Image: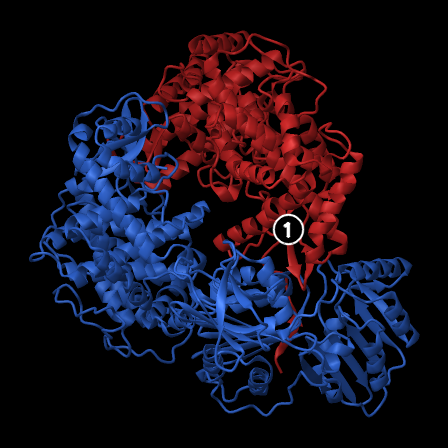
Amino acid sequence: MKILADMVATRGCSSMVAATYGCDLAWFERTIGIGLRAAGVRQFVLFVDQGELAKTLESQRGLIGGAGRWYSVVPVRMMASFHPKLYLLTGDERARLWIGSGNLGPCGLGRNREVFERWEVEPGDPTVPSVFGSLREYLVTLVRSSVHPPAHVLDALEAALTAPALAGPPRADDERLLASPGELFTHVPTPPTAAETLSLSAPSFDCGGEFVVKLADRLRATSFDLVVDLRTTNLTPGAAARIQQRGGRILVATDERPSHAKLVWAEGPGWALGIHGSANLSISAWYGRNAELVVLRTGVAARRIGDLIEAMPARAYDAADEDTLRRREEQAHKDVPPPAHLDPGLLIHSCIVVDMNTIEVRCAGKPLPATALGLTTGDEAEVLLAVEVGDGGERLRARLPESFSRSVLLARLIAGELRGPFAVVHDPGELAEWAHEVDRGGRRLMELLLTDVDDPDLATAYVEACARVLGDRLERARRARAQLPDIAPAGARSPAEGPRWHLFRGPGAAPHEESTGARTGITNPVRLLARVLFSRNGHADDDDAAGVRESESPDEPAPRTYELRERPPVPAPLKLEFRRHLVVARDAYLSGLREWSAPLDADRLLEDLQILAIAAHRGLNADVITPSEYLETQVPILRAFLGTRGAPLPRSLAAWPGRASERARAELIGVVGAMLFQACLARAEITRDEVDPRGDFPDVGPVLWFRHVLDHLGPISSAGLDAAATRAARLRRLGLWLDRWPAQLVKVPFRSFLARMTADAHALAALQDRFAAELRQSRVPAGDAGDVTIVALVDGELACGFVEDRVGYCRHGAFQGASRSAIWEPLRQSQRGLTFDHLLELAAEAPLLVDALDALDRLCG
Amino acid sequence: MGFVDWTAPSGGGEAGVDHLGMRVAGEVAYSQFFDFTTTVSWRPRYFSFWCSALRRAFIEAGGQVNEPESKIDLQRWRAHLRRQDHAIAIASLLADPAAQRIAGSDHIHAELGSAPHDDARVIALTGEHLGARNGSLSIYLGPMLQVGLIETDGVVHRPGPTGTMLADAFDAALAASGMEPVLSASEARIDDLRRLGALCGITRLSHGGDVEFIAREREVLRTIITPPLGADHGRLRVLSIGLLLDAIRRSQEPLGLDQFREYAALGGKSPLFAPAARLPVRFDEARNAWQSYQTHAFATLALEGLLAASLSMAFDDGPAESRLGELLVDSFADGAATVDPLHLGAGWSERPVNEVVAALLPRFDSDDADLPREPTLARVVSSKVRAGRVAEPAPYIATCIGLFLVTVARMRWLDARAPDAWLGSRASWRLPPRVLLDTLDRAIADRWDVRRLAAETFEGLVLGQHRRNALRKLEADPSLYTARFVIDEGRVVVIGLHGPGTSNPRVENALSFLADLGYVMSGSAVRLTDAGTRLLASICEATS
C-alpha cells in the first residue's frame, strides 16, 4: 500500500482530519498539504499529542509555513500519550479512511514498514462501512472529553464528518474499532479454547514485558512468537527474558526497512483474532493511560493479520541481540530527560487571533501570576507581550504589536523562569477564507481540463471542432507569412511522419508586431471553452465564469447542451487527445490575437486572459504541469496580450473612453499582478531561490510588464493598489491563484508585491524618461564581459542585458535578466544604449534619480 | 472489511549530493573560471564538429543561414543532428580505438562488435547511440554558448559568426577526407567512416596537429577559448587558464586536482610549487577569486564532514533529538583532547575564538611550511570517510572543526584584502562566505570559545542547514525528500549516510581541453608544451 501516494492522489474531497502521536509539520506542508490543497481540500485538522507537538514546534521553528493559517493543529493532552494514527479525507464525492501504525511524517508514511487499513465510500454506494460511524463517535467523544477545541476546529470537524460521501445508511458489518482513553484490554475477547497460534509484533513494550504475558495468558497460548525490530524497539533484556520464560520465541526482523507495526494474530479451534493499529504491547496502551485506536478482526478476516506477520522476514534472537538491547536500555536511561513538572497554567489549550490586534489564549489550568506571552514567527526573536486575564480566569489576552509580521506564529506562556511549550496561533479568519473559498469554477476546470475528463462529448468533440478550424486557419496564415511551400524540403520523409514546423528567430529577427498578416476574423476558442467548462447542465454560470458573456461573434458555434452526470470512464488516450486540442486551440487564439488589427473590447480581453491563466494555474496546482511548463505557458500568453505597446490589451485600454474606471483598473492590476507574482514564484521554484520578503525578484521583466500596464492606465494610487490587492480573494475563487507556495505567499503578501512592482515601474519610467536621448544616441561602449547594459528597444521599451563586442544583448519584455543563462527568449541586439556604470555616472549629475537607479541595480541583479 | 496491508516505501531514498546546499554556491563561481567546459565535456573538437553539424542540420531542415527568421522542420533537424553525431562518434573510434571521452563510446563499441575491421560492412546511422534528445550536443551546448559560438532561440541552434568561422575550419578537414556525404547519410560503410575519422575524428585535433588545416582549426579554437586579454569577453577564463598553466609549470608533483586546489587555496604559496617570479598584478583579480572559491570549498568540505560524522554517529543508536547536539559536542571535546589540527596547543577547544583567529591570521602571510594549512586538513577530512561511515568520529570532528576555523579565518583575511573576490552565489541559504563570516563575527562579539563555536556550527550550519535545504528541495519536488535524517517519535532516524565533498571540479576537464589544444602534454606527468609556455608568457605580458 502506497499510503502517501494514495492519500495525495485522492480527488473529490474537501476536508482532512488526522490524529497522530508524532508529526513532522514541515514535511506535511510540503507533501500531503501541498498535494491535497491542489486537489481541492480546503480544511485540515490535525490532532497531535501535546508533548510531541511541542517538540516539533520547538525543533521546526522557522520551517513551518501554514500552521494556523491553512490548517489547524490541535494539541491533545493525555495522562500518558495521545497515540492513534488515523487519516480521514471526506468530501462531496468520496471519503477515505486509513487507520494503522504510522505517524504523520516521512517515517510513518514513507520509510518505515507500517500496517494500515483503508476504507472508502462514495455517494453512490448503497451503504457506508460501519467504521466511519465508529470513527465519528470516537472523534466526537475525544473532542468533548479531552480537547475542547476552539469553534473553528469544531466547524471544520463537523464539515468533515457530515460530508455527503458519508450520508448513506451504515453497513451492518462486524468491523470493530477499539478506541481509548479507557481500558482496551477488556474488549479483547476471551476465546472459547486455548490459542494454538499466537504471533505478535510491536516496537514498544512495558519494561517488564508484562502486557505480552497478560495477553498470552488471556489467549491461553502455551507458546508464541514475538517479532521485534532492533532498530525501533524499546524491548529490554529483562522483558525479553520474561517473555521467553512465558513461552515466547523472540524473532528479529531483518527487512531493510524498520518495522513499526503493531500486530496481534491468534487462532484456536473455532476462533481467530487479529488486531492492528496504534497500540503497542504495553500496559499504557491497553490499560487506558494512552489514547489508542485499533482495529479488531475476528473469524476469517483475522487471518489477514496472520499473513502480514508471516510476511515479515525474521531470524532467531541471539546473544548479540541481547547485548544490543542492553546497550539500548542504557542509552535510553541517558536519553530520558529528568521529569519536569509543568504547571497546567503554562500549557496552552488553544491560541487564536481574535482580531487584527488581539490574541486570545486558553490555558489548560489557572494562569500563573505575572504570566507573559512569548510570541515568535520562528525566524525572528521571541517577543514578550503583557497579558490580561479574561473571562473565566483561564483565558488570557495579549495585544499584537503592529510591527509583527503576519506569518505563522508560535506562542508560549512564560512566568518568570518557567517557560511553557510552544503552541500554534490560529487565525480563524484566514482559515475560514481557505475553508469557504472553494473555487468551484477552477475545480471544475481542473477536473475537466487536466485530470478527470469524464465526458468524451464534452471534452473532445467540442474542442476538437473549434481547434481544427482554428488550426487550419493558423497554418494557412503561417504559410502565407513565411511564404514557404506546402511540401517539406527536399529529402525523403515517410508519409506518416509529418513535419513539426518551428519558426526559428535569430538575433536579428524583426519583432512580431512588424508582421503584417491580414486577418479578417477571429474566432475565440477560449470563450467557447469557458462557456462549456464553467457551465452546469448546459447553462452558463456567470458567477463562476468571471462574468463570461455569450459571444456575439458569428464565427462561434452555438453552445452544445450536455449533462454532467453519470458517464462512462474515459480511456487515457482520449484525455491526452483532449489536452492536445486545448493547446492547439490556445495557440491558435494567441496567434489570431497577435495578428488582429481592429480594437477589441478590453473587458473581453481581460476575461480571456483570466481564462487562459486559470487553465495553467489549475494544471500547476494539480501537478499536471511543472513550474517550467507553467512559465512556458504564461509567457506567450502575457506576450500576446501585453507584449508591446501595439499588443491588443494596451491598445484596447488606450481606446477606452477617458480613463478607465477605478474598478476596472484594480481588476487589471490585480489579474496581471497575480499572474506576474506567481510567475515569479514559479521561477523562484525552478531556480530554487528563496523569495525576499520585500518582494524583490531577480528579474526586471515583471516590472517592465507592470510599467507597461501603468503606462496605459496612468498612475495608480495606494488606494488603487489596495483595491487590486483585495482582488486576491476573488482571483482565488476564480482559480487564478496558485496554492503551491504557501510559505512564500505568507512571506511576501500580494499587496507588498504590488507595491514594490509599482514603485519599481515608476522608477524605471523616470529613468527612461530622463535618459531617453542618451539611450537612443549613445553607442554601447566596449565594456567588460558581463557588464550590464541598458538599451531602449524599438518601441521605446527599456531592456537590460549584457555587453559583448560593443553590442548590447537584451531580452525583450518579461523574464529578461542580465545574464545569458535564461533561454525563454532569443536575445535582441542593439548597438545603442548605456552600460549600467555609465548610467551611474550620469545619475551623479541628477541626484533625484538615485532611487530609480537603486531600483534598477537591484533588478539587474 | 477494509483493505489492510504493509505500507510500501515512498518519497526518499539516496537522491541528492548537495545536502547543505553549499556546493551550488561554489559551482556558480567555478562556471565563470572554466566556462569553456563542464564536468562532463572533455574534447574541444566537439565545438568544431557541432558548429559544422548544426549548420548542415539547419539547412537540411529548411533553414536559411543568413536570414534572421527561418522555418525549421524540427524532427528533421533533430534527426540530422543525431545521425551526424552517431557518424562522428563511430568514425572517431575507428580511427582511434583507444580514444577516451567520446560520447556514446560504450554503445558504439558494442555496435562495432568483434568486426571493426570489416571494411565493407554497412552501419546504420540511427542516432541511437546516446539517450539525450540532441545527442552529444546536449553535453557541449552550454560551453559553446558560453564562448559565443551559437545562436539560439531556445529550441533550435545554429552557429553564429564565430561559430561559422569554426565550422569552416572543420569543413576543410571534412572536404579533405572526401567523406562529407557520410554526415548526411543514413548509413555508411566502415571504411568510409574510418577515412572520415582519420581527419575529422574528435581526438585528431591533438594527433593531427601536423596537418595544415587541422592546425588551422586548432588555431581558431585557441583564439576562441583563449582570446587576447584585450577582448571584451573571456578575461576571467584566460586568467584562470594562466593560473592553471603557472601551476603546471611550478608544480613539483604531477599536477592533478589536489595540487591545483592547493595552488588555488594558498595563492601558489606552498612548498609543492617551485618559487617563481610573481605573476603580474592583473592576475590578482582571478587569483583572489580562485582563493575565495577554494576557501569556501574547503569550508563546504568541513561542514559536510561534520554532517557525515553526525549521521555516522547517529546511525546505529538513533539518539534522542535533544541529546544529539550534546553527543556531538562531547565528541568534539574528546577529539580535541587528542588531535590539534591547527597546532594551536593543548586545550585549544577551550580557547576563545577571537584568540584563535588572531593566532591564525599571521599564518596566511607566513611562508612557514610546517604550519598546517587547509589542503592538508582537507585531505584528512576526505580520506577518513568510507561509504559514509566515520570510523573514529571524535578526532574526525576535531579535524573538521579545525578546517572550518582556518577557512573562516582565511575568509576574514581575504575579505580585508579583496572584499569582492567571491563570485559564487550570494544567496544566504547557500551559506556563502558572508554568512560564514557573520557566524565568526558573532562568535567573536559574544566571546564564544571554540567548543561553543562547534556547538553552534553543528546546530545552525550543519544539522539545521541540512534540514532547511532538504525542505527547500522537497517544496520544489514533493515526491523527493532528500533529508539524511528525520526525527521520529523524538529520536534521530538516519535515512542515509553522506560522503563529504565540494562543488564538482573541472580541472581535469580543463586539462583535457588544454591538451587537445596543444598547450599541455598529458600522461603520467602533465607539463607545458612550447605553445603552453608561449601562451602563459603572452598572458603575463598582456597583464603586465
Which residue sits at x=13%, y=64%? A553
Please name the amino acid that badge 1 sits on.
Arg
Q: Which chain is red?
A: B
Query: Split into 4 quadrants, where in the image is the C terminus of chain A?
Result: top left
Q: Which chain is blue?
A: A
Mark 1 packing: few (<14 Cα in 10 Å), some, or many (20+)? many
Left or right: where B435 falls relative to A510: right
User: Pointer 1: what residue?
Assistant: B484
Left or right: where A459 falls relative to A843: right
Residue B362 image position (x, y, % from top left): 62, 22
Task: State the residue in front, A79 or B400.
Answer: A79
Among the 4 quarters of the image, the one containing residue A189: bottom right
Residue A384 image position (x, y, % from top left): 51, 61
**Residue B505 appears in the rendering:** no
Query: Split into 4 quadrants, where in the image is the N terminus of chain A?
Result: bottom right
Residue B272 image position (x, y, % from top left): 67, 16
Which residue sits at x=65%, y=35%? B353
